[in-house]
């Protein structure tokens, strides 16, 4: 299982870093999928940095097609609420995605 962890200093202008961790102890930096923010990841608000954070995490976790459908909702429901440090598991992301997709089907 993967765990996504983000960190930035107290100043939101500082670069934000996201790493992907495995239970084995291995990790790698999350690849920035650039769609809205050329300056990189961010979170805690509803802007372009948060959009790219959501898109990048979902692309890594769920694949590009599903990420493209869900990243704006993930940005508003999850990423916009994060503080300077956070972590979210792959399982939590998949549960969130399943719930959102079910709600789309009920509309």
Image (cartoon, rainbow, N blue to C red):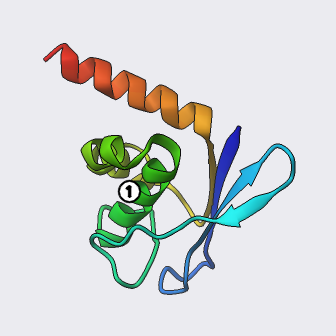
Quarter that holds the C terminus: top left
Left or right of 24 in this view: 12:
left
Left or right of 5 in this view: 73:
left
Identity of the residue furthest to the top in this view: 106
List the residue tagged with mark 1: 55
Q: Quadrant of residue 104?
A: top left
10 Å crowding of disc 1: few (<14), some (14-19), many (20+):
many
Quarter that holds the N terminus: top right
83 shown above or below 66:
below
| Residue at 38 percent of width and 56 percent of height | 55
| Residue 62 coordinates in the image, percent (x, y) | 46, 41
Front residue of 16/2: it is: 2
Secondary element at tag 1 = helix
| Residue 76 coordinates in the image, percent (x, y) | 32, 49
Left or right of 60 in this view: 70:
left
| Residue at 35 percent of width and 46 percent of height | 67
Q: Quadrant of residue 29?
A: bottom right
| Residue 64 coordinates in the image, percent (x, y) | 37, 50
| Residue 32 coordinates in the image, percent (x, y) | 47, 70
Q: Quadrant of residue 77?
A: top left
């Amino acid at each position: 299982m993967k765990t996504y962890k983000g960190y930035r200093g107290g100043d939101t202008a500082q670069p934000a870093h996201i790493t992907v961790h495995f239970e084995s102890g291995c990790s790698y930096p999350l690849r920035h999928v650039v769609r809205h923010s050329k300056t990189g990841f961010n979170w805690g608000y509803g802007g372009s940095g948060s959009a790219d954070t959501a898109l990048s995490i979902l692309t890594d976790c769920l694949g590009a097609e599903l990420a493209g459908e869900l990243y704006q909702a993930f940005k508003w429901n999850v990423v916009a609420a994060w503080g300077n440090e956070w972590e979210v598991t792959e399982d939590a992301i998949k549960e969130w995605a399943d719930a959102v997709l079910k709600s789309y089907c009920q509309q």
